[in-house]
Amino acid sequence: MIRTQSTEPCATAGAGRVRAPFVVAQLGARMHYAVPRILAAEGQLARLFTDICAVQGWPRLLKWLPNGVLPPGVRRLKGRIPRGVPHEQLTSFTGFGWEYVQKRRQARSAEQMTAAHLWAGARFNELVLRQGLGEARGVYTFNSAGLSVLESARQRGLRAVMEQTIAPTEVEARLMREEWTRHGQWGSGGFEENGLLREFGALEAAEWNAAQVIVCGSEFVREGIREAGGPWEKCVVVPYGVDCPPGRVRQKPRGPLRVLFVGTVGLRKGVPYLLAAAELFGADSCEFRLIGSIDVSADRLAGLPGHVQVLGSVPRAEMKRHWDWADVFVLPSLCEGSATVCYEALGAGLPVITTPNAGSVVRDGVDGFVVPVRDGNAIAGRLEKFMKHDGLLESMSKQALLRAQSFTVAKYGERLTEALLG
């Protein structure tokens, strides 16, 4: 249970004095609105501002329509429900949110997508400040969508907190340029052709300077801010938490080992290295299932062996059967914040094979394996361990379930409020 904190100012290590409650300015439904839900449960939420959700404006009518008649994107919108946030503390900008959706859909290049994000961040800040911060004593924003709100908060003497949800753009761009050198036109868009990255990175840096506290989901993110020359001393690492249906213990299968990947099928998630590992196995030993939006040219997925399925995006409500299908989860990502799918996989009882750059809480050799980035052979070697060693899959699956108990939303709430409120 999340404990209740006093609203009186209190100390937090290296960050001065905290005053609450907070206004949360959040684009999208990140982690099912975990931050505003946590603050609402603590009595520390003044208001949640967001772009579009399923409980205000015309999207609230979607609940009357069966999922079968709705396209996947609208089904996802139908699930944007900030549960636990009182209606009177919620303001959504539905028209703006829908315009943002359209701009993202119309983007035909990485640069156009970055332009859409920059436009949305600036416009969202304008809308929030037009509504006003009321009697709030602090703000909580997210990277690339909070600069003006943070600056306004500081001018008014309010607490200014931002969350860096992924490693800085400078770090991501370096890693992706390296990938493009390795893989050519493997992806559908390229960092080297994006002339707006410098502007985007400058926006991140300005937000770091405006914030008093920078919340990072992993040490990888904090080290990325240090690498980018940012104020890493403001950073506090707060691993996330997720709630999911109780998982089950996996045992060594009699047939092929079933390997699941969930995430964007593209370069940043390390998919070329997962496919390289898959090529080392036959259909009699491993089956691979990749779920997520496709960020790769069609010809690169042509000719995949029959034991590799690429399913595309799947609505979250339909994911349970895929978690149930799998024996092992693999996320060989090159750049993350702290990938929530790894938390979800642990909760499902799946041992996880991932990289240090995924920012996960997986313990190498205990509830999974942490392998170097860009190493398909290392992935294959760990998968082979599950096939060769009786009892390994079962023991790691049990450890995964135990590990997940420390990373529920309630436990995340305890860590987050401790960081914010002392």
Image (cartoon, rainbow, N blue to C red):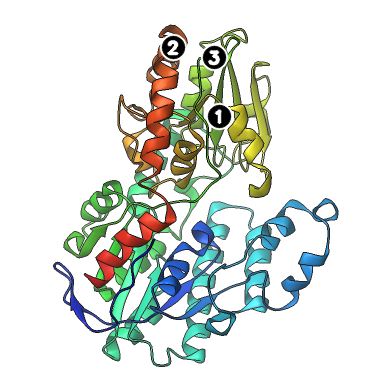
Q: Is residue 217 left or right of residue 267?
A: left
Vertical comparison of 134 with 35: above or below = below
Query: Residue drawn at (73%, 56%), measured in percent from left and top?
Result: 75
Secondary structure of the residue carrying numbered label 2:
helix
Query: Residue drawn at (57%, 27%), measured in percent from left and top?
Result: 326
Vertical comparison of 420 with 286: above or below = below
- Residue 316: x percent and y percent? 63, 48
Quadrant holding the N terminus: bottom left
Q: Amino acid at mark 3?
A: Glu
Residue of label 2: 384
Q: CA distance from mark 2 to mark 3?
A: 13 Å
- Residue 127: x percent and y percent? 53, 84
Query: Residue drawn at (43%, 7%), measured in percent from left and top?
Result: 388
Residue 186 visible, this orientation: no
- Residue 168: x percent and y percent? 34, 55
| Residues under numbered marks 2 and 1 in contact, where contact means CB atoms less than 8 Å apart | no
Residue of label 3: 279
Secondary structure of the residue carrying numbered label 3:
loop
Residue of label 1: 260
